[in-house]
Image (spheres, helix red, strand yellow):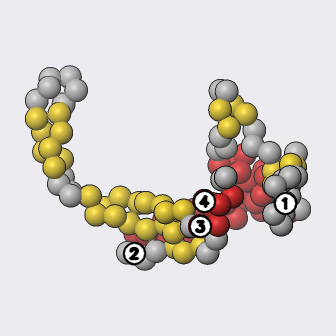
Amino acid sequence: MIADHQDGLDHRQTPVLPVRGGQDEMDKGELANVVATTADIPKALAKKVVDAWIATITDTLKQGGDVILPGFGVFYVKQRAEGTGRDPQTGETIAVAAARVPSFKADKGLKTAMN
C-alpha cells in the first residue's frame, strides 16, 4: 500500500508501514516486500538487494569505514570504553570490556522528514 505525503514537499510515494503489536515497525522480510513494490521488481530480487545492502554496510563497518548516505545518515563504528556493570542476579560488580559498536547518525534530510 502506498501513502502520499500531504506536507507540500517533493516526496516519492512512500509505502505504509505494516502495523504489528500496536507499533509501526518493519522487519527485513517486510522491508524486502516494500522494496519490491516500490521498485517494481520481483520479491526474490528485492530480498537479495536488502541482504546485499545489509552485508555491504556490515563489511564496511568491520573494515573500519563509514557508510555515508547523503540526506539519510551515516553508519559508523564507535569505540565504547571499558567500564563496570552489575550482574542483575547477584548484584556483583563486573568488568565490562571495551568494544567497537555500530552506530547511526541521522542526516538533516531524514531529521527534517520526521517533522
Which circle's residue, 3 or 1, is located before the other in the chain? Answer: 1
Q: Quick check: marks 3 and 4 in contact, CB under 8 Å?
A: yes
Residue situated in front as seen by the camera: 50 or 21? 21
- The residue identified by callout 2 is 63
Query: Between marks 2 and 3, how big is the CA–CA gap?
Result: 26 Å
Query: Between marks 2 and 4, how big is the CA–CA gap?
Result: 28 Å
Which amino acid, by three-letter code, is at mark 2?
Answer: Gln
Q: Which mark is residue 8?
A: 1
Dot 3: what SS? helix
Which circle's residue, 4 or 1, is located before the other in the chain? Answer: 1
Residue 40, compared with residue 91, is above or below; it is below
Query: Between marks 4 and 1, how big is the CA–CA gap?
Result: 16 Å
Residue 64: give x, y in percent of width and height. Answer: 38, 75
Which circle's residue, 2 or 4, is located before the other in the chain? Answer: 2
Which amino acid, by three-letter code, is at mark 1?
Answer: Gly
Which residue does the image show at 17% across and 33% down from the upper left? 86
Query: Between marks 1 and 2, how big is the CA–CA gap?
Result: 41 Å
Asked which quadrant contains residue 11, the reply is: bottom right
Dot 1: what SS? loop
Q: Quick check: marks 4 and 1 in contact, CB under 8 Å?
A: no
Q: Which mark is residue 111?
A: 4
